Amino acid sequence: MTKDVIALTQRMPNPSAMLAGLLSGGPDKLVDTAGEGALMRLCDAEGRPLVSVEAPLLVQVAGEAERLLGATPPPVPYWWTEARATTGVEHAEHLAGTFAARLATLADGSAWPPEAAQSLAVVQTDDVGVVPAPAAQPTVDVLTDKVAVVIQDRPVVAMTAWLQDAFRTAGDAGLGLQIVSPAGTTLSPAVLHGLSNWPCRWVVRDERDGYYDGQSGAVLRWQDGMFTPVAGPAPTADDPGTPVAASYQEVTDTGERQLAVTFRTAHPADERLVLGGALESIWRELTGKPPAGWGTAEPANLPWSPRQMTDIAYERAPEPTWFVVVGSPGRPGLATVRVSRTKAGVEEHVTLAFGYGSDEELPVDALPGAAEMLATRHSLLSMLVQVRKARRDLAVPPRFEGPGVPLAFVLGAEEVRQMPGDRARKTPLPQPPVPLGPKTRPAMYYPLPGDPLDLSGWQDFERLMRHLKGT
């Protein structure tokens, strides 16, 4: 049975429905329901958490339950209430399932996964109570002096509020976070950045090789308090010879592609500043529509609103703020936005991707216009555009997908102005740069030649970077 159970309901679970769910262990087990809006836990007599329940979340963006769970929710808006059972504790999974089943029944909805919420009957346990625990970390299943381990058996490992807390807590403690999932699970692109620091890993359970790294394919073993790569038969200091899992190498080209765009903007720190304008502009240019929704975690639960994003970032300043932005189900798109205060002002670092099927054209011809709009209206610093063989739905599988290949690089007008001489207006590549915006203060668009799926494009990109840096 799954460890995560989610109730998707038409109505907000009111206090009576939440109480009925929390009574899954029987009426004599309830101790307290204080702490409105806080995380609550069902605990045993020794204080061990059995089930952790987060406050219901109102989802106003279509497609999120389908994208992250493969579930059919009620029409938007609907309520998303998560319950997580503690790994390895008897009765915990049954309690979580009964909790979600009762909420789904009383608030008109369904529970995911269906097989986890079959019964409304009281789960027989001993010495179970409920306590408010705003600072609890229900996501962490194993803790060592090196890593915190999270077991996720959802279809898509998403950057939920719980997982964000786990990353934050592990980082504050100087630990890595390692996520363990079954072979059929995929990763949301929003989680990738959090796994970039060693010893953070995505650990995939595998029938043939035991465990392997979902991003590199390296076969892993649990050693010295964390998952580490297995050494080959004749390891050396320079090459440990780590074997690559066979499952990771099973690649099928379906013809699906992704257009990936990474860019940075910098704005003066002004009270009139509204964030998200650059992202909305390029989204419209490449798809014909604005983003559908956003949030500070997944699922993205709020309709697209640059003003509301700005308000959140303003409240959290000078600390950085992270957002996830999603598109409509018909055109898969996902972006992560990091807003931070720097010497240049307020910077937005955006990583954006759109998915396309084998019969869909990538909007390559629209790229120069999109770049010019960012450069002239949204204080663009730089932008890199790539195309890669990858899934249309944007989910990251535990398989080799290959790197992207650069299609274009853009240098913002201020960066061009600061470059000595006319270096920015020249290029070592066959195709000359294309000026964007006013002639007196242009940005530069550098098209990269060759087959978009030819990895030699990176050689051209490196030549361009060396030229612009004067090395």
Image (cartoon, rainbow, N blue to C red):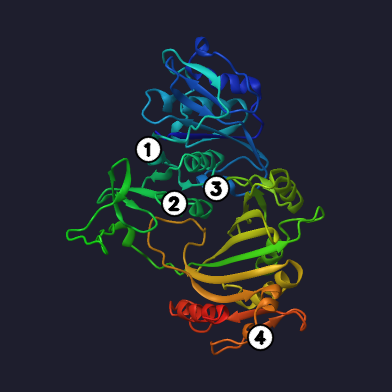
Q: Alpha-carbon neighbours of circle 4 within 10 Å: few (<14), some, or many (≥20)?
A: few
For marks 4 and 3 on the same chain, the one whose residue lies earlier in the sequence: 3
Residue 34 drawn at (x, y percent): 62, 19
At x 39%, y 41%, the residue is 147
Q: Secondary structure at mark 4?
A: loop
Q: 183 above or below 110?
A: below
Tag 1 secondary structure: loop
- Residue drawn at (54%, 82%) of the image: 467
Marks 2 and 1, how far apart at CA: 28 Å
Sequence-wise, which precedes: disc 3 or disc 1? 3
According to the picture, the residue beneath numbered tag 4 turns out to be 421
Give the CA distance from mark 4 to mark 3.
Answer: 53 Å
Q: Compare residues 115 and 138 and report the one nearer the observer.
A: 138
- Sooner in the amino-acid sequence: mark 2 or mark 1: 1
Label 1 or label 4, whichever comes before in sequence order: 1
**Label 1 crowding class (10 Å Cα cut-off): few <14, some 14-19, many 20+?**
few
Badge 2 marks a residue whose secondary structure is strand
Q: Which residue is mark 1?
A: 145
Q: Quadrant of the N terminus?
A: top left
- The residue that label 3 is drawn on is 66
